[in-house]
Image (cartoon, rainbow, N blue to C red):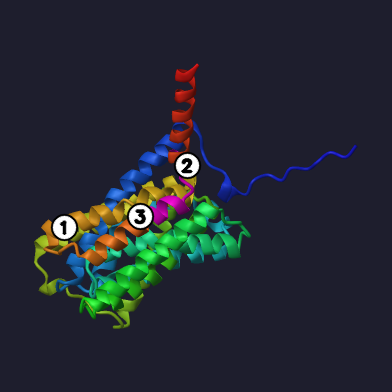
């Protein structure tokens, strides 16, 4: 009789349990709230005198200084991480990703950025899972991914038909940013680095890149032409909220509950952005945004493997059987 050998689950399929899992859910919810603020701040910054360099240095500079001790503390873990994973983290959430968000925000409203980036990155995560990790997709995931694609197609088509000829440029840039964020999320999950060390390493390298670009005159700054109040507000949002707080909570959530569950919770981001952009930025929630929002949010929930409706149905059936006895 031969014993069957069971292969251990890969690290990217192993999740926490108990209180750690609940804390991961809470961290993901908190990250979602910060993302909503981030996309609105990016739109406000992109339509001001601030340049993409200014927004990026506000995002990474202070975080690089404050989180440097954590980089030193966990340097051996960072050093032992495969270079391809580190590159994916740096490209996926560093200067390239940030510049894409900034460029896209100059063309399309905040509601589009929140919808496309947080809504479609599960689509790119699924592609990575199938191509690299040879994962098979369930029917529910396929339906969910199709709904995401349909929602984005509706958003782009209706926006173009409606005469918003500049929106599609920003939307395509946001799609590319979503692909970068998916690469970051997968690499972050597989690397399993401590959240603060990862956020510090990302901020440190990104700040060094930005400093080099500025030193060689490749990028320009608009700080002298920007009101101090706007600079301070962007510093608080970009550096403190996104760089420090979300840098930790997103890394913690990815490590504890995985990218798919995080993306399911993150599907609330476009709803928050769409509702907040109207009173803050004066943006109108168009029919194209509303249709795209509904389809994408539904698709993200399905693609993330959410099984709450099924469980509720089983409980209801069990309750009915008890009553009939």
Q: Gap in Å between the C-alphas at discs 2 and 1? A: 40 Å
Extreme residue in the top direction: 325
Residue 117 inside the magenta-drawn segment? no
Residue identifier under label 3: 297
Please tell me which of labels 1 and 3 falls first in the chain.
Answer: 1
Front position in the image: 142 or 314: 314
- Residue at 37 percent of width and 43 percent of height: 27
**Could you say where residue 225 lies in the image, as x and y percent from the top left?**
11, 74
Q: Is mark 1 on a helix, strand or loop?
A: helix
Residue nearest the viewer, comparing 134 with 34: 134
Lower position in the chain sequence, tag 2 or tag 3 = 3
Q: Which of marks 2 and 1 is nearer the N terminus?
A: 1
Label 1 neighbourhood size at 10 Å, few (<14), some (14-19), many (20+)?
Answer: few
- The answer to whether any part of residue 220 appears in the image is yes
SS assignment for the magenta stretch, majority: helix
Total marks in image: 3
Q: Quadrant of the N terminus?
A: top right
Q: Compare residues 147 and 70 and report the one nearer the observer.
A: 147
Apparent side of residue 297 relative to residue 322 in the rendered image (left or right): left
Pointer 1: what residue? 233
Q: Is residue 132 toward the left or the right of residue 157 in the image?
A: right
Determine whether, in the image, residue 265 is placed left or right of residue 1: left
**Residue 307 magenta-highlighted:** yes
Q: Where is residue 229 in the image (x, y as percent from the top left)?
A: 10, 60
Q: Where is residue 183 in the image (x, y as percent from the top left)?
A: 48, 63
Give the magenta-colored segment's residue range.
297-308
What whole-number distance in Å separates the C-alpha atoms at marks 1 and 3?
30 Å
Disc on res. 307: 2
Q: How far apart are marks 2 and 3 (CA)?
A: 15 Å
Mark 2 surroundings within 10 Å by alpha-carbon count, few (fewer than 14), some (14 through 19), many (20 or more): few
User: In the rendered image of this protein, does residue 157 appear above or below residue 192?
Assistant: below
């Amino acid at each position: 009789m031969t014993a069957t050998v069971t292969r251990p689950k890969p690290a990217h399929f192993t999740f926490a349990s108990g209180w750690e899992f609940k804390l991961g859910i809470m961290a993901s919810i908190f990250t979602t709230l910060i993302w909503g603020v981030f996309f609105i701040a990016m739109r406000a910054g992109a339509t001001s005198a601030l340049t993409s360099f200014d927004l990026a240095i506000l995002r990474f500079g202070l975080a690089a200084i404050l989180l440097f001790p954590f980089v030193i503390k966990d340097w051996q873990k960072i050093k032992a991480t495969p270079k391809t994973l580190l590159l994916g983290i740096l490209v996926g959430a560093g200067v390239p990703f940030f510049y894409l968000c900034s460029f896209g925000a100059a063309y399309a409203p905040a509601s589009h950025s929140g919808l496309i980036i947080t809504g479609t990155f599960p689509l790119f995560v699924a592609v990575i899972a199938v191509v690299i990790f040879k994962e098979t997709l369930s029917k529910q995931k396929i339906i969910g991914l199709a709904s995401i694609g349909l929602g984005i197609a509706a958003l782009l088509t209706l926006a173009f038909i409606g005469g918003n000829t500049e929106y599609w440029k920003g939307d395509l840039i946001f799609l590319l940013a979503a692909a970068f964020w998916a690469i970051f999320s997968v690499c972050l999950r597989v690397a399993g680095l401590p959240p603060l060390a990862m956020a510090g390493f990302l901020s440190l390298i990104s700040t060094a890149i930005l400093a080099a670009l500025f030193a060689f005159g490749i990028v320009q700054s608009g700080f002298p032409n920007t009101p101090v109040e706007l600079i301070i507000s962007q510093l608080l949002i970009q550096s403190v909220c996104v760089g420090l707080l979300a840098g930790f909570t997103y890394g913690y959530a990815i490590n504890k509950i995985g990218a798919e569950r995080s993306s399911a919770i993150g599907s609330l981001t476009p709803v928050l952005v769409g509702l907040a952009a109207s009173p803050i930025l004066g943006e109108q929630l168009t029919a194209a945004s509303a249709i795209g929002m509904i389809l994408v949010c539904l698709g993200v929930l399905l693609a993330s493997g959410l099984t709450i409706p099924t469980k509720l149905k089983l409980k209801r059936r069990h309750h009915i059987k008890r009553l009939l006895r």
